[in-house]
Structure formats: structure tokens, C-alpha cells
Image (cartoon, rainbow, N blue to C red):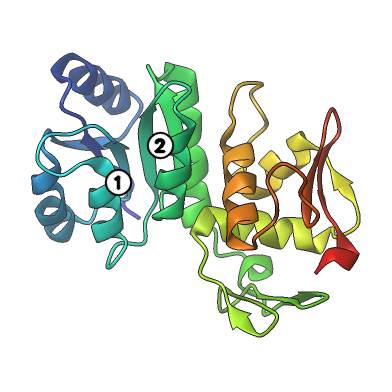
């Protein structure tokens, strides 16, 4: 990555786009912009930004379609900008490969923290991260090096966010892990008291493994305590 990380802001709201460009530039980032979803792929192929801030509601192609197309060749972080409290956007965005999401209007400190965390995770090449490691819980098989998951012999396709969370929960199978620990391990930051992205990914994982969302048996939310991947349910 260059000394000045290159961020692409994809936003059709002129005032918001200008604010993000000014704010990010002041914090040491090189910033490019697109205001139409149809122009994003060409920009990314030409410039390969280190991170993309991608609005969902765009003229041309919407953000979900843009993210889906980018993930065919682009592996750097994509942070979706979603309407506040729109959980459907969050779920769909994570399912098509978004690395993270931020509810609009974005708070400056939150925006900067999320960008730093995602860039840090993308460039983390420590031996622990690259070490070959197999996690097995019943019929659940996770290869953290090959980034592969299978369940009962069937390959399960997961987004990066889903894979990271599942691997962490599986490493602690049978234990209740608190929300703060999950955020630090999976997202590289502390829980800010508002971010619902872990709950969104939990919901997506339950769908992947046909776990009843109203009475989940495999991945449980323990209210007031955290999350539990049930050992004997796999």
C-alpha cells in the first residue's frame, strides 16, 4: 500500500461527497470520487484504490450491483454506506462481499475508525493470520488458510465478514464470547455501542446453515452476554 492510502468515495450526494473528500484528505488519504454506479468499475480497474466507500442508492448501477461486480476481481475493503436502521441493506451488502457498513449520516470519528480498521485488516500479514489452521466442530470444517468452509461434506460459500465471524466463534465453540471480544477479534476495534454489523452477520450465517432465526440451535445470541456457537449442534 502507498504511504497515502487511496480511497474511492462513491456517493451522488454532492455535499456529502465533498465533506468526505475534505475530511479524508485532511487525515492523510488520497481521495477519488464517483457519483454514478456505472462509472465505478472502470475507475477501480484503472486506479485500484486501497478502500472503497460505496453508497447503496446510486444513479446508474446501485451499490449492491456494483459491489457484486467488483468482487469478481477486487479484493480490497469495501465499506457500504447504508440508510440508518435499514437492516436489509446491511444483510444484502455483507452477503455480496462488503467488508463493513456505516449508517448514514456518517460520524467523522466512526468513519475514520472504520477506514483505519479495514485497511489494517487488509494489510495484516502476520504469521498468525497466514498460518495453516483447520477448525473442526462436528460436521463443520473450516480451513482458515484456504478460506474454505464445508458443512456435512458440502462446500458453503461465505462472504469475508461471515467467514471471519464464523471462524472466531468456532475457535471458541461451546463458550459464550462477549460482543467486545468479537469486535476486537473480527473487526480490530472496540464496540462503539451502536454498531449492529455483528448481529447482521450472525443473521446471515444462520441463513447459510438453515438455523431457525427465531429459535436458533447452532449460533445463539445470549442476551446481555454475547454469542455462542453450540458445539453439539453441528
Q: What is the number of the mark on residue 36? A: none
Residue 16 against residue 218 in the figure, above or below: above
Which corner quadrant holds the N terminus? bottom left
Q: Which mark is residue 64?
A: 1
Q: How many marks?
A: 2
Q: Quadrant of the C terminus?
A: bottom right
Q: Are marks 2 and 1 in contact (CB under 8 Å)?
A: yes
Q: CA distance from mark 2 to mark 1?
A: 8 Å
| One can see residue 4 in this view | no
Residue at 88% from the left image edge and 64% from the top image edge: 231
Q: Is residue 200 visible?
A: yes
Q: In the image, is 61 to the left or to the right of 201?
A: left
From the image, tell me which residue sits under label 2.
Answer: 89
Q: Residues within 10 Å of mark 1 (few under 14, many from 20)?
A: many
Residue 58 coordinates in the image, percent (x, y): 18, 34
Residue 21 to residue 197: above or below: above
Secondary element at tag 2: helix
Q: Position of residue 143 (x, y in %)?
A: 65, 77
Give the image quarter of residue 20: top left
The residue sitting at 60% across, 76% down in the picture is 145
Amino acid at each position: 500500500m502507498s504511504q497515502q492510502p487511496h480511497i474511492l468515495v462513491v456517493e451522488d450526494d454532492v455535499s456529502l461527497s465533498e465533506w468526505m473528500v475534505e475530511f479524508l484528505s485532511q487525515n492523510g488519504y488520497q481521495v477519488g470520487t464517483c457519483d454514478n454506479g456505472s462509472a465505478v468499475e472502470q475507475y477501480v480497474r484503472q486506479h485500484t484504490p486501497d478502500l472503497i466507500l460505496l453508497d447503496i442508492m446510486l444513479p446508474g448501477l446501485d451499490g449492491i450491483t456494483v459491489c457484486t461486480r467488483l468482487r469478481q476481481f477486487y479484493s480490497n475493503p469495501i465499506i457500504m454506506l447504508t440508510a440508518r436502521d435499514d437492516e436489509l441493506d446491511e444483510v444484502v451488502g455483507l452477503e455480496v462481499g462488503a467488508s463493513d457498513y456505516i449508517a448514514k449520516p456518517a460520524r467523522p470519528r466512526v468513519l475514520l475508525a472504520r477506514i483505519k480498521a479495514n485497511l489494517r485488516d487488509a494489510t495484516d500479514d502476520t504469521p498468525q493470520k497466514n498460518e495453516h489452521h483447520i477448525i473442526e466442530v462436528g460436521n463443520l470444517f473450516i480451513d482458515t488458510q484456504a478460506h474454505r468452509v464445508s458443512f456435512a461434506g458440502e462446500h458453503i460459500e461465505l462472504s469475508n465478514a461471515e467467514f471471519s465471524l464464523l471462524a472466531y466463534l468456532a475457535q471458541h465453540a461451546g463458550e459464550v464470547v462477549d460482543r467486545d471480544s468479537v469486535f476486537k477479534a473480527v473487526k480490530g476495534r472496540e464496540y462503539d455501542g451502536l454498531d449492529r454489523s455483528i448481529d447482521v452477520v450472525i443473521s446471515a450465517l444462520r441463513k447459510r446453515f438453515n438455523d431457525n432465526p427465531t429459535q436458533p440451535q447452532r449460533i445463539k445470541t445470549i442476551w446481555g452476554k454475547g454469542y455462542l456457537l453450540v458445539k453439539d449442534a453441528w
